[in-house]
Structures are given as C-alpha cells and as structure tokens.
Amino acid sequence: MRINKQIGIIIITFFWLNLGFGQSQKSFEKLIAKTNNYLEKYSKLSPFGSEEFISLDKSGLPKNLINEINKNYMEYDGYTQDSISEFNLILEFQGVIIENLTSIISHKKFKDNKIEDLIRQDFDLSIAVSDDKKLFNFSLDEKTGGTYRSRISITHYTNDSIVPSMNNNDPHEIINQHQVFEGDGFDNIYSLETEQGTKYVLTGFVRGCSSCFELNLMLVNNKSGFFEKDFSYIINTRFPQECTLDYNSTSKTIVVDYITDDLTTDCDCTNYAMLDENEYNNYSDSDETEPITKRCHCTFEFNGLNFELVKESWEKEKE
C-alpha cells in the first residue's frame, strides 16, 4: 500500500514541476495549511503504541488514502477495514507529510514565501535555511522508538531543476539530489561567498544511542551541479554538555572543545574531508596504552577558500 503510494508521490512531484506556471498563492497556502494539520496529528502519535488501533475516520489521514486502505487492508499487518495501528499510522503520516513537502518545494510560489515562518516547527519538523535563501533542509523525527533519534531529512537547493523525492523501493529513504547531504538533517546553514562561488557551512547534532551523541559540521561547495565537501569535523561523545562545535559566521571561525572518552579517545584537529575513507576509519590512538582524559581544543579560520587550523591544544582533565 505504501509502495504504491510512493510511486504516486513521485508522479505528483513531477506534475507540480511541469505545471508550476499555473500555481497560485492560494494553492500554496492550502498546501501549507494541510501540512501543518498533518504535523499536528503526527506530533500526537507515539512509536510505542503499536498495539493500539485507531479509527481511520478519526486518524486525520486524507480521504483518498483512507479509501485506499479500505480496499487493500488485508494485504498488510496492522490494518483493518476501519482502523490502523498507531505505528502504521506514523508511517502513513510520514508519507503524506513528505508528499506535501516535496509539493511545497516544487511550487512556483516557494521562493516568494518565508517557508520557515509558515510551516509549524513546534512539533516534529525542523527547518534550516541558508543566509542566501538557496539551501534548505527539512528534518522530521522518524519516531522509530529506539534510542537512536533518527530523522527523515530532505535537503533542497533552489538552483536544482529536480526536487528530492521518496524512494519507491524504500518508503523511508529520501532521494536527495546530492549524496553529501544524506543523514539526519542539519540545525543551521550558513552561506560563504568565495572566489570559487558560494559555499555553505552546515552544522548538525544527533543522538545515536542512550549515551552516545554526534556533533558534526561541514563546508560544501557546488562543482558542476553537485555538492562536495571541502571541510568536515565530527565529534562522537558521551558528554554533549561538555562539547562545543560552533561556527561564528561573523568571524568565519570554527571553535571546537571537548573531553575525551571511550568514543573519542584522543585530541584530533584533523579535517576529515581531506582524508580518504580508509584513513578516516583507521584513525585511533593506538600508541597510548592507558589513555588519560583530556580537554581538547581546536580553532579553524576561513582563509577565503577553506578552513585551516590556527590553534590546537589540550590539557589533562582534573579528576
């Protein structure tokens, strides 16, 4: 059922692209209103309610989707003719929310509106927009119920002719135009004007398990229509409250502070975008048999093209 729906999503997306000239502000506002309504319904659902069944008439799903479920409910677990499990309702709402977001992105009026002020972000959706209003990231709490707080992420660059869409082979995978943006989304996006064109700094945070967290930052540039990394820095830590990975858009400076633990055993100011995959995966503090806990610091400054290390230090953490 969801597979058939995803095929429909892709068709709808290209329909909006081809007929964009006939779209009005009124139709755009209608899409926004529907999306906000779906987000509000979605916010009230729990991934731990898989045994709970909800009446389709009270589910908040669009009528055409309810009719589809009525016709095909016997093909899937978690559905009856007139009800749906809470977990499956989460999956169905993810589909309609992403469908609406792709329609909003491809709408002729998208660039004329401040989307981050129109779509409700006090629920499960976050929106990051670059300073130049050309790079957008939408990230939706996936509500898997695990300690890994995964998010469905859609990144859209307004200069692209094709918008992101859902993979019809995997209803939880977004097909983004640029692989460099794959992951759990971003908290902030900053634009940087350089002699090589506009580059972007993106920062993110994700909880990977009950006691493991990742802070990440990267600088990307667009070459021949595709984004590539120029700079990348990642902190994996047990103590996010003790960590800083900040970008100052005024001074164009990155400041990194953290304490070592079993996830990050030593101080390292390496730009990971400059390493190949084997170098990155093989990095370890193998020479230190009894690692000590350290407070680490790195400062990077933008030199007009990339970030370069200008300060690094560490000190032993006091017990």
Image (spheres, rainbow, N blue to C red):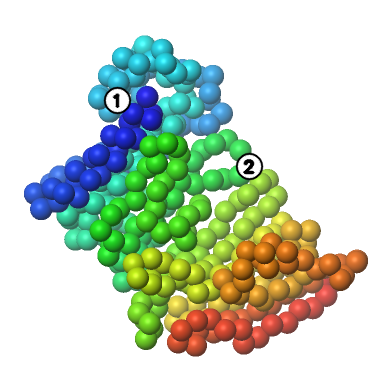
Q: Amino acid at mark 2?
A: Thr
- Residue 289: name its quadrant: bottom right
Residue located at (42% from left, 16% from top): 75
Q: x, y percentage for residue 265?
A: 78, 65
Query: Mark 1 vs mark 2: which is more N-terminal?
Result: 1
Using the image, tell me which numbered label, if any, was put on residue 65: 1
In the picture, the quarter occupied by the C terminus is: bottom right
* Image position, residue 264 (x, y; %): 74, 63
Q: Residues within 10 Å of mark 2 (few under 14, many from 20)?
A: few
Task: Compute the Cα span from label 1 to label 2.
Answer: 31 Å
Foreground pick, 124 / 166: 166
Q: Nearer the viewer, residue 313 or 70?
A: 70
Q: Amino acid at mark 1?
A: Leu
Q: Nearer the viewer, residue 277 or 196?
A: 277
Q: Residue at x 61, y 68 (%)?
A: 276
Q: What residue is disc 2 on?
A: 147
Q: Which residue is at a point 87% across and 70% down the rendered structure image?
A: 288
Q: Residue 29: x, y in percent? A: 19, 47
Between 243 and 105, the one lying in front of the other is 105
